Amino acid sequence: GDHVVLVVHLPEGPFIADVGLGEGPRWPFKVENASWTEDGFQFAMTSRSGGEWRFDNPVNATGTMTGFAFDFGTSTDGFDEFLRFHDFFWNSKESSYVKGPVFLHRKTTGRGLLSLFACTLRRSHPEVSGGKEILQVATTKEEWFKIVEDVFLMTLDDLDDEEKDRLWDIVQMQHQSFVNAAEKK
């Protein structure tokens, strides 16, 4: 497989309870051959050979997660193996988690997924023309932190002023990179 998932074993069978699937299902889902729709988003789980399973997100509204595979034949050896994954995802320049902040929030009311990539707040949903709409583009540090707090309920109070300035610098660089790439198209 290509993804580490949290599997919860219940009397009804194993369930995936992965909080990292920003645009994925809102609720835990049973590991079984199935397809389902939540809030207009379609998902599927299929069995493959050798104990591997495939989760598919065909809409891929944000362009960040088409799906993943995982293997019941493997599991973490213990906390040391988990720490190696954690170290890679949070410290490696190859990890998307350190390239810049990305916030995703599945709305509990209304329809869609809110995402903040760099300075751009957008709503994604299969019913929206083109799959997504831009709601706001933050132009100041204060505006960006207000979006993070109001929309994603994260105050980031644990960051001091210097850390907030560094984060804003990263956000601006990432946003400019997106703008430059769009202009080349």
Image (tube, rainbow, N blue to C red):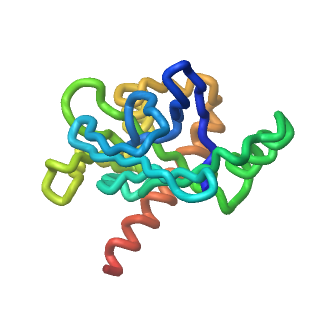
Horizontal placement of 31 versus 91: left or right?
left
Residue positioned 40% across, 72% down in the render = 180
The front one of 175 and 25 is 25
- Quadrant where the C terminus sits is bottom left
- Quadrant where the N terminus sits is bottom right
Q: Residue furthest bottom?
A: 184
Residue positioned 42% across, 57% down in the render = 66
Instruction: Place residue 76 in its image quadrant.
Output: top right
| Figure check: 9 above or below 60 | above
Residue 59 in the image: x percent, y percent? 29, 54
Residue 33 in the image: x percent, y percent? 41, 45
Residue 142 in the image: x percent, y percent? 42, 35
| Figure check: 184 above or below 66 | below
The front one of 93 and 138 is 93
Count of number-bearing discs: 0
The front one of 7 and 147 is 7
Horizontal placement of 136 versus 82: left or right?
left
Residue positioned 32% across, 75% down in the render = 183
| Figure check: 147 above or below 100 | above
Residue positioned 52% across, 38% down in the render = 20
Q: Residue furthest top?
A: 11
Residue 178 in the image: x percent, y percent? 41, 65
Horizontal placement of 39 versus 7: left or right?
left
The front one of 13 and 179 is 13
